[in-house]
Amino acid sequence: MAEYDAQAIEAKWQERWEEEGVFRAIDLDATRPKYYMLEMLPYPSGTMHMGHMRNYTIGDAVARYKRMRGFNVLHPMGWDAFGLPAENAAIKNGVHPRAWTNGNIDEFRRVLRRFGFSYDWTREISTCEPEYYRWNQWFFLRMLEKGIAFRKKSKVNWCPACNTVLANEQVINGYCWRHEDVLVESRELEQWFLRITQYADELLDDMKQLEGGGWPERVLAMQRNWIGKSQGARVRFDVEEVAGLSLEVFTTRVDTIYGASALLIAAGHPKIAELLAGVPGGEGLQEQLKAMQQRSVKAEELATAEKEGFFTGRYAVNPFSAERVPIWVANFVLAEYGTGAVMCVPAHDERDFEFAQKFHLPVKVVVQPPSGEPLRADQMKEAYTEYGSSVNSGSYSGLATPAAIEKMTADAKSKGFGYGETTYRLRDWGISRQRYWGTPIPVIYCDKDGIVPVPDDQLPVKLPPDVKLTGEGQSPLATDPDFVNVKCPKCGGPARRETDTMDTFVDSSWYYMRYCCPDAATMVDKRTAYWMPMDQYIGGIEHAVLHLLYARFWTRVMRDLGLVSFDEPFERLFTQGMLLAHCYYREDASGRKRWFYPAEVEQQFDERGAPVSAIAKEDGQPVLYGGIEKMSKSKNNVVEPGAFIERFGADTARAFVMFAGPPDQSAPWSDASAEGVHRFLRRLWSFSYGERTRIEGAASLEIADLDAGLKKIRHELHAALHQARFDY
RNA sequence: GCUGGUGUGGCGGAACUGGCAGACGCGCCGGACUCAAAAUCCGGUGGCCGCAAGGCCGUGUGGGUUCGAUUCCCUCCACCAGCACCA
């Protein structure tokens, strides 16, 4: 074989791998150490992009390396097959979601196979198959029995574009995570929730197991931040002139309570109406309140908004100092966090300081810095928020901050007006979706028996194949009478089936355990115990909170039900960087941009090789350089893996992405660089087959170069993986 | 603002545990082949000075530790990402 014919070489070896089953993982093999290597499963929509391909290439390099080092490697692949885009395609094009999804899966599988990734294809799973989602349902029923799954009426995030409920995690700055320009609305609905807050402390504390290189620090930081644990105290202030009414505040700095010059409550506080009732001149206040409640929708405006507020005309009594403080409504107090009310201590809180400056509330210093000049209220330019020692705080004066907090919290409790409390930002996980293409929630509503679980022997509750999908109004399943109208499993009387389906993050919360035993007659079995916990997981940073937090939670529930015996599912996590690409554009008179494909553009350089300008090949006129951006269809800078392989072969593509930069950082795609890698591979090929006649005359080309060349490649891979802090 | 991260040629980047900075690739320059171009192949390519041999400078900034620092410590600066009025 003289020429480097990538297509022929790769086809030959891929066929042989397939025939001999060399990537088959051996269950329960006790003779070798096991290694479970997994890349996050893809959502098969449209065509595969280079970002997928980078993810899988990194994982494949590790899997192959481990295999060669004698490990029994599990490296599977499957499909995150439920989800909204399938349904939207159905609405738009009249294709059934299943047909659309399976078509995409076939295309993804074809490209992945062509890449020659070392998957054990015998373990492939697809989350939209009843064989898989029946276990979502089965486990949901177990969670229902344990009180982990529960139903409550609650304010939900409603996306008018998706026509469904979103989890908190799917709301980004008040906008839908799928529709950047669609504001999420608030609605009251009966929803199913999973009690992830019950595990908040454990999820937080167990991060210790993941520190020290197992998980990227930033992912841990994001999860910590998301859980948002905060220790403090809750203190009750009685409201004057309104019998029986009191307001509670949450604070992490109860030691500053002698410096409180007001009590601030959120415009959405549940007791606001009661508070304002009967206040002289109350009509004006109602107007102001309305205005403030309406304003508080847009998150991005909120963040930059000026401090606003108004005095309610009411006073409350500070239970420590017995001082009267005015009650204000303030726009920066969050109704959803803590108690929806705070004490305003201008001297020791930045926001309160700003608020006090604007509305001329008194500033009272109650904490002095441990050293340096003592603070003077009339000279302060900003709040002092550090720890120090208490002053002007009655019998607590002189105590260091931690001691003051401890003593005052204890006293609040013994005197009956407060107690120590821990709050979290984390909310329970709402899983109800008013959509068709998801796992049906397996419960039945009976007028007589209430909520009745579907008996285990009637699982799975299958999705009816034909349902009208319009994208409007109620859940599509609710329009199918055959699905909805059932007999109550308890009394046999007429009943209605739940028509909501589960959030697709349910599917991805445990799929990695099913790869271990895809044909098991139970949710998991002893093979899961053999392979889990996973040794190395690889995926995008966008899943730092959503998927990874849910999966950690789900695993703990499985543990508490005796299904598995470990806490953390993923021992090591790696988040790969994005693949970027250059982009070019030209603006027309109206300022509209036309984006050029890189192939349509020619880059100009100066004599030193620095890029100076670019021209369009079609007319020779200049185009503007848009920088290195995330690959996106709108910018015409997407590189299609399929097309690239046809030209250069999979090995070139794989070698290039490992070579383009540290795997955990973003890297720009470059056709030219990729071709350079291709030349390099071709050269190696020529050496290894002794086909050196074409390059005779070059003194440096000796057999030793082959060895050196191979060493270099090995070195590259080592360097890249080492850089990425893989444990391999 | 808080948290996490990153700064090395024209570009992507390499340098293992503190030991010849700039591997490899792109781009650029020169050459071979060609009537010519493309493709391919060969050589050169951090900056400055020098005909050359060679010399000096050089890993964001300023300092420190060390025989020796891209690497370790401190200061500052810039950029990227996530969170953000969370009391």
Image: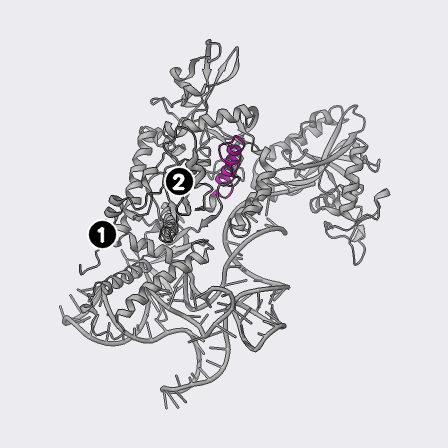
Left or right of residue A103: residue A221: right
Which is in the foreground here, disc 2 or disc 1?
Answer: 2
The quarter of the rendered structure image containing the C terminus of chain A is bottom left
* Residue at far front of view: A31
As drawn, the label of residue A387 is none
Give the residue displayed 28% in from the left and 59% down from the top: A678
Q: Chain of mark 2?
A: A
Give the structural element (helix, strand or loop) at label 1. helix
Give the residue displayed 81% in from the left and 42% down from the top: A258
Q: Quadrant of residue A355?
A: top right
Q: Nearer the viewer, residue B66 or A669?
A: B66
Give the residue displayed 56% in from the left and 32% down from the top: A428
Q: How many marks?
A: 2
What is the C-alpha distance between the residues marked 2 and 1?
36 Å
Q: Is residue A558 above or below residue A702?
A: above
Label 1 crowd (10 A; few <14 / some 14-19 / many >=20): some
Residue A240 rendering spot, x and y as whole percentages: 81, 28
As drawn, the label of residue A28 is 2
Contact? badges 2 and 1 (CB < 8 Å) = no
Residue A32 rendering spot, x and y as whole percentages: 40, 47
Residue A588 rendering spot, x and y as whole percentages: 37, 50
Q: Is residue A27 above or below residue B34?
A: above
Residue named by callout 1: A7
Q: Quadrant of residue A517?
A: top left
**Magenta run includes residue A357:** no
The quarter of the rendered structure image containing the N terminus of chain A is bottom left
Q: Which region is colored magenta?
A: A543-566
Is any part of residue A116 visible from this angle? yes
Left or right of residue A717: residue A240: right
Label 2 crowd (10 A; few <14 / some 14-19 / many >=20): some
